[in-house]
Every structure is written in C-alpha cells, then in structure tokens.
Image (tube, helix red, strand yellow):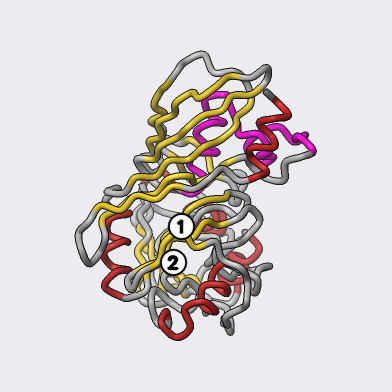
Amino acid sequence: MVIPMVMNNFLTFNVDVKYVSWRLDKFLFTVIEDKDIIVSRTAIQRLIESGMVMVNGVSKNKSYRLEIYDFIAVVLPPPKEYDVVGEDIPLDIVYEDSEFLVVNKPKDLVVHPGHGHETGTLVNAILYHCGEELSGISGVLRPGIVHRIDKDTSGLLVIAKSQISYASLSSQFFRHDVKREYHAICHGRLGDLEGTIDAAIARDKKDRKRFSVDDSGKPSITDYFLVENYDKYAYVKLRLHTGRTHQIRVHMAYIGHPLAGDTVYGPKSTPTQLIGQCLHAKTLAFTHPKTGEWMEFDSELPEYFTKFIRTVS
C-alpha cells in the first residue's frame, strides 16, 4: 500500500513491491487521489516533463519503470487563486447562533467555489450573510465549511463561525460522533427491512471522477432502513457511520439498488422529473462546540423528492 505524504507544496511516495515495473506516469495517476491537485494523466505527464517529479532526487521521463523502494517527490502546482466574495443568494437557515449556523441546501447548489463553479455557491451566500465574521476560518475557498454534500444532494449542512467551533465540529465529524440521516429513493424493491453495507471505498481506477467499492480503499459503513416499497422503486432511510465521498451512492449501487436519478452509478436513462440523485440529508445532530449540548436538526423533504414519490407510488 502506498501512502502519500504532503509536506508544504510537495507530495511524496515510497514505492512498494506492488508497483514495481509500472510506468511513472501511470503510477502517479493511480495513487494521487485528490482531483483538486491533478485531474488527468496528461497533467501528470506535463509535470514530469517540466521536471516537477523527481525519483530518488533525479528527474525521470514519464515512461520510467519503477523499482522497489523508489522515493518519488512531486512539486505540486500552485492552487488557482479565487476572489471569493459574498453574493446575495437566498439561504434556508434552520438554526443560527454565535458559533455556527445550520442551512438546508437546495438541490443544484454547489457548496464551495471550484473549477466551473467560481461564483453562485453556498460559500458565496454564507459570506454575504456573515460578512467578515468567517474570514480566515478553514481557508479562502471553504470558510467555515465543516463538511460537504454533493451538488445534486439536498439537505442540512453546518457552518462554523469561529476557529474554535470549526475545530470542535471538524473533530466530531472526524471521530464520527455526529448523527447523519439521509432519505433516498432507489431503484428496485428491497427485500430486507434493514441492513448494513460494510464495504471499503476508493477512487475508481478507470474513472477518477467516480468512486467504487475496493478492498484497498477506506473503511465505509452505511445502514439502510426500508420505509416503503413501490412498484419499481424503494424509499429508504440511511445512516452514515463514515463520511466518504459519494458513499451512499456507491454503496446503494453496490447492493444493486442505485439511487433514482443517479446517472453516474445507476442507469444512464433516468426519470425525466429528476435531475441528479434523489437524496436528501434530512437529519443532522452533533454536540454544541461551546455549551456541550446535544443539538439535533431536521428538515422537511423537498418538493422534488415528494413529487417523485407521488409519481412512483
């Protein structure tokens, strides 16, 4: 197993026996999991050709064949600079105090700025709402953002309003001391009333924008509970024990019940009334970072969700 280490603007690897004789460019494309750093094999090849990749302190070409215990250092390209400003975008605020706010994110709203979404994000809306209060908390692009949900997933998110609250909430999420319950519609009728999916998840080796069940990945556990079976679909509740990217979508597809509307992990043809997966982060609970009180929040199912239920039930 290769474990990358990040030091300042360097990413380093020690090559184990599994990757002996692999091409350098293929190796880096396989093991670098953060698509925000490098998104394509072509980009990796450009780094190699420009001397930004060193093997045992020496620059090699992209077709170099790895040897056991090779030490690889990659000089990371500087991150793209964004001028993130507040925008007057309506927010559905479920709760707010001096330490954090909980918002109900609508479907189709991106959480933070990035390639293709430099404005019009939840971060822009929060900056407008909170002003300078969030400056410097967890970085320029993600001020106060403790956790994320996909663009096409709706539901509850907590945003920290101070460094102390950010540290406390981030620690709770890291230790899995929070409660997160999602509601979803999936393809096919469920035979079991409830179950647990315990399957590690890693970035897909063939498509770096996808994730898949892989024994070499990170431990991932999802509980599911049947609410109601319909003719061709099922309404389920899901609880996360871990928080991997696309976890629910990957796990439900893995057991043969991909989420309705999810063209990445499910059928390419999707119900016309759905754009993106039918998935809502309905319940969120955690310990208040200042008072120590257990705080639990719930949200109503959005219109797209209830409308789809009416069409399939």
Which span of residues is magenta-colored? 245-272
Q: Amino acid at mark 2?
A: Ile
The residue furthest top is: 191
Identify which residue is drawn at 48% across, 57% down.
Answer: 148
Residue 237 horizontal/vertical position (percent): 47, 32
Q: In the picture provided, is 35 more to the left or to the right than 69? A: right
Residue at image point 65% right, 34% down: 260
Front-most of residues 71 and 133:
133
Q: Secondary structure at mark 2?
A: loop
Residue 46 picture quarter: bottom right
Residue 137's x, y, as percent? 38, 77
Q: Above or below — where is 51 with respect to 176? A: below
Relative side of 234 to 16, left or right: right
Label 2, residues with CA under 10 Å away: few <14, some 14-19, many ≥20 = many
Q: Residues within 10 Å of mark 1 (few under 14, many from 20)?
A: many
Q: Position of residue 311 (x, y in %)?
A: 73, 29
Q: Which mark is residue 118?
A: none
Q: How many marks?
A: 2
Circles 2 and 1, Cβ within 8 Å, touching? The answer is: yes
Per the rendering, the mark at residue 145 is: 2
Determine the CA span between mark 2 and mark 1.
8 Å
Of tags 2 and 1, the one toward the viewer is 1
Q: Is residue 290 visible?
A: yes
For the residue labelled by badge 1, is the local secondary structure a helix, a strand or a loop?
strand
Q: Which residue is at 58% across, 19% downward?
A: 229
Say whether residue 271 is magenta. Answer: yes
Along the line of sight, the residue nearer the viewer: 279 or 242: 279
User: Please, what is the three-letter code of the amino acid marked with disc 1?
Assistant: Leu
* Res 21 visible: no
Q: Which residue is mark 1?
A: 157
